[in-house]
Image (tube, rainbow, N blue to C red):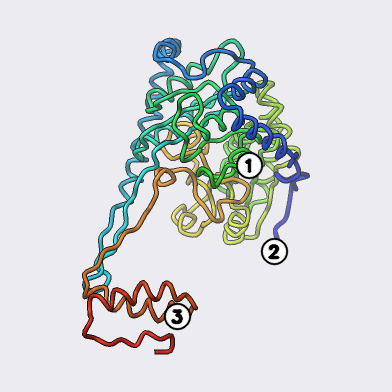
């Protein structure tokens, strides 16, 4: 049967595409031209903060001292998990040297970028986990300089827990500046910072647009939209846990889609009945986001069987994908489009968001159909090299000359010709396109 929508979204992530492009272009241009002073002007305007931009060691120590020991232990636990997973990821990329044909050797090297700019949101929520995820992976990758950037609060500065997280994760500098001005400062190398080679980390629509515009001048992790989550659940799933997990992700923002895909009508009905009750029980600031997200962006879809469920999930290509269904190995093998996968009731997206070790900077808005999330690999350039003996160069030069002439690229052909003439002066070669 066709997919049956028990609940259909009234809006999509594109419905809220307010035009921030011109605003961001102007801010970036002003800061590139005006340098430190212009960035400070925008910081005073938007951050309402006039303290030190780059935290001193004394300010970092003072902020760290404000973090309770139990929270420090939790942050250290999360950091250690992210670090261990990132180290394992790094081990999957190796330098390679291979003799392709006798006398011609080619290779691969993984080289970390020099400077990384890591953005950790600090507005309504203090995204401690984002500081851990972005800085730790950059450190494991081997970046020579890491700047952690987070919006300060008026008269206070960066949340102490974010400072502590960035510090223990390996940030070389911690910058109290938010929004476009923070992104610009890292990109243009203001306040004595090295120019960032890559910008990573989540942010609001202005931060996302700034990264979009700057991409090409610098690398970025991805262009992020509102966070989204999908749950695949069968008749054996616990409706209370399914509903709780949906609500937990809806609280991210008023436009954060959550989707339930199931082959059990009874489960769909039960979850839909429970979600509003769970939303009403949230604190007010969380309740507003979750209520709007559920009302306008959420969907509940009933499918005929698990294959149709899997196909639906792949079509949506969610950022976060949870499976609460029988035969988890089948789902792991079958599913192909997701940012991060959570198999079974015993884990949840919240674990991945905060402390499990996998990175929470992930593709949104269907981008999981073609890319994965942040990892040590994003901070590394996979480059190639080659060398050859004269004998090894011979067949490559012949093929290069003929292919180049077929393409009409005579200069390329002659670069091969001169080597053949020098190395093998007593031999004759047919290097025409039709040879």
Image spot of residue 272 (x, y percent): 70, 40
Residue corresponding to mark 3 = 405
C-alpha span from label 3 to label 2: 57 Å
Q: Residues within 10 Å of mark 2 (few under 14, many from 20)?
A: few
Image position, residue 264 (x, y; %): 64, 51
Q: Position of residue 79 (x, y in %)?
A: 39, 30
Front-most of 319 and 211?
211
Which residue is disc 2 drawn over? 1
Question: Which image quarter holds the N terminus?
Answer: bottom right
Task: Give SS at disc 1.
Answer: loop
Along the viewing direction, whichever of 424 and 228 lies nearer the viewer: 424
Relative to 421, say whether 384 is above or below: above
Q: Which mark is residue 225?
A: 1
Split into 4 quadrants, where in the image is the C terminus?
bottom left
Q: Quadrant of residue 364?
A: top right
Q: Nearer the viewer, residue 428 or 291?
A: 428
Quadrant in the rendering for residue 391: bottom left
* Labels 3 and 2 touching (C-beta < 8 A): no
Please state if 274 lies on the left or on the right of 393 as rendered: right
Picture layout, residue 241 above or below residue 179: below
Q: Residues within 10 Å of mark 1 (few under 14, many from 20)?
A: many
Residue 321 visible to the viewer = no
Helix, strand or loop for disc 2: loop
Of labels 2 and 1, the one closer to you: 1
> Could you say where residue 414 lies in the image, as x and y percent from the top left?
38, 75
Q: Residue at x 34, y 77 (%)?
A: 417
Q: Residue at x 58, y 49 (%)?
A: 232
- Using the numbered discs, state the Cα–Cα distance from disc 2 to disc 1 in whole angstroms: 32 Å
Which corner quadrant of the image does residue 430 belong to? bottom left
Asked whether residue 244 appears in the rendered view, the answer is yes
Tell me the element at label 3.
Answer: helix
- Marks 1/3: CA distance? 47 Å
């Amino acid at each position: 049967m066709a997919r049956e929508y028990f609940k259909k979204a009234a809006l999509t992530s594109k419905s809220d595409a307010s035009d921030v492009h011109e605003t961001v272009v102007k801010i970036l241009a002003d800061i590139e031209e005006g340098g430190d002073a212009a960035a400070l002007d925008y910081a005073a305007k938007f951050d309402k903060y006039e303290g030190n931009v780059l935290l001193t060691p004394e300010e970092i120590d003072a902020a760290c001292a404000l973090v309770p020991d139990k929270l420090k232990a939790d942050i250290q636990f999360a950091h250690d998990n992210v670090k261990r997973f990132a180290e394992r990821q790094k081990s999957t990329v190796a330098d390679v040297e291979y003799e392709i044909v006798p006398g011609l050797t080619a290779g691969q090297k993984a080289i970390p970028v020099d400077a990384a700019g890591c953005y950790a949101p600090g507005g309504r929520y203090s995204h401690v986990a984002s500081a851990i995820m972005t800085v730790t992976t950059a450190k494991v990758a081997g970046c020579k300089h890491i700047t952690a950037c987070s919006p300060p609060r008026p008269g206070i500065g960066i949340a102490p827990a974010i400072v502590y997280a960035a510090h223990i994760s390996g940030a070389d500098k911690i910058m109290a500046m938010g929004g476009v001005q923070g992104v610009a400062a890292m990109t243009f190398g203001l306040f004595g910072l090295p120019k960032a080679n890559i910008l990573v980390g989540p942010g609001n629509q202005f931060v996302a647009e700034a990264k979009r515009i700057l991409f090409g001048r610098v690398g970025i992790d991805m262009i992020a939209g509102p966070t989204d989550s999908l749950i695949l659940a069968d008749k054996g799933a616990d409706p209370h846990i399914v509903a709780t997990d949906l609500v937990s992700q809806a609280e991210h923002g008023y436009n954060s889609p959550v989707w339930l895909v199931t082959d059990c009508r009874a489960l769909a009905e039960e979850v839909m009945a429970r979600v509003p009750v769970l939303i009403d029980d949230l604190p007010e600031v969380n309740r507003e986001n979750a209520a709007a997200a559920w009302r306008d962006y959420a969907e509940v879809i009933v499918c005929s069987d698990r294959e149709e469920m899997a196909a639906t999930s792949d079509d949506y290509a969610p950022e976060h994908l949870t499976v609460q269904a029988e035969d988890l190995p089948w789902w792991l093998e079958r599913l192909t489009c997701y940012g991060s996968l959570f198999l079974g009731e015993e884990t949840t997206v919240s674990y991945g968001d905060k402390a499990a070790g996998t990175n929470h900077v992930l593709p949104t808005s269907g981008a999981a159909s073609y890319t994965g999330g942040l990892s040590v690999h994003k901070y590394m350039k996979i480059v190639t090299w080659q060398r050859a003996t004269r004998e090894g160069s011979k067949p490559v030069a012949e093929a290069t000359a003929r292919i180049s002439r077929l393409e009409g690229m005579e200069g390329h052909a002659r670069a091969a010709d001169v080597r053949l003439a020098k190395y093998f002066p007593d031999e004759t070669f047919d290097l025409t396109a039709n040879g």
